[in-house]
Image (spheres, rainbow, N blue to C red):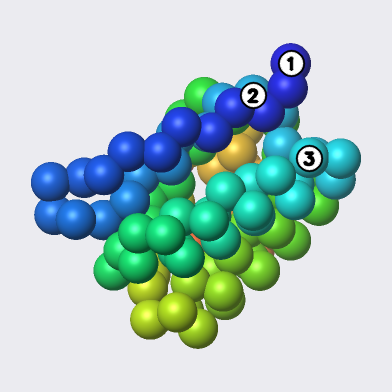
Amino acid sequence: MGLSVTTTVSPDGGAVLSVRGEIDHGNADELRSAIQSVLASRRPHTVRLDLGLVTFLDSGAVGALVASHRMAAAEGAQLVVASTSPFVSRQLDIAGVADLLGAPHTTA
């Protein structure tokens, strides 16, 4: 399964990117580009990533998330992972970036 990113605006003016599918080194730049585009076009104070329907995440994807977090901060915005699948939550915990990205912790 490929990667799908849908962007909506939340009631508070922030941007929500709903991501579905697999994120790996082959398509991580697509996610980073989608985040960069939202930052440039909408200038939100917060970008929330909904990763609840992401089924796979590798180190390339984690790198893209961390780079996007830094990019958002440079633009004066906050990037947070608002929801995760259990697999993604474990991967972010293992990589040591769950707290940096504000990812919810699962007990699974």
Q: Earlier in the sequence, mark 3 or mark 2?
A: 2
Q: Are marks 3 and 2 in contact (CB under 8 Å)?
A: no
Q: Secondary structure at mark 2?
A: strand
Residue at 35% from the left image edge and 59% from the top image edge: 42
Q: Secondary structure at mark 1?
A: loop
Q: Which mark is residue 70?
A: none
Between the residue at mark 1 and the residue at mark 3, the CA separation in whole angstroms equals: 11 Å
Which residue corresponds to mark 1? 1
Using the rendered image of the protein, determine whether residue 82 is visible from the camera's viewpoint. Answer: no
Which residue corresponds to mark 3? 27
Which residue corresponds to mark 2? 21
Q: Earlier in the sequence, mark 1 or mark 3?
A: 1
Residue at 21% from the left image edge and 45% from the top image edge: 10
Q: Are marks 2 and 1 in contact (CB under 8 Å)?
A: yes
Q: Are marks 1 and 3 in contact (CB under 8 Å)?
A: no
Decide: few, some or many residues near mark 3? Use Cα within 10 Å; few <14, some 14-19, many ≥20.
Answer: some
Under mark 2, the amino acid is: Gly
In the depicted structure, whether residue 26 falls above or below residue 34: above
- Residue 8 location, x and y as percent? 32, 38
Pick whichever, 80 or 93, lies toward us.
Answer: 80
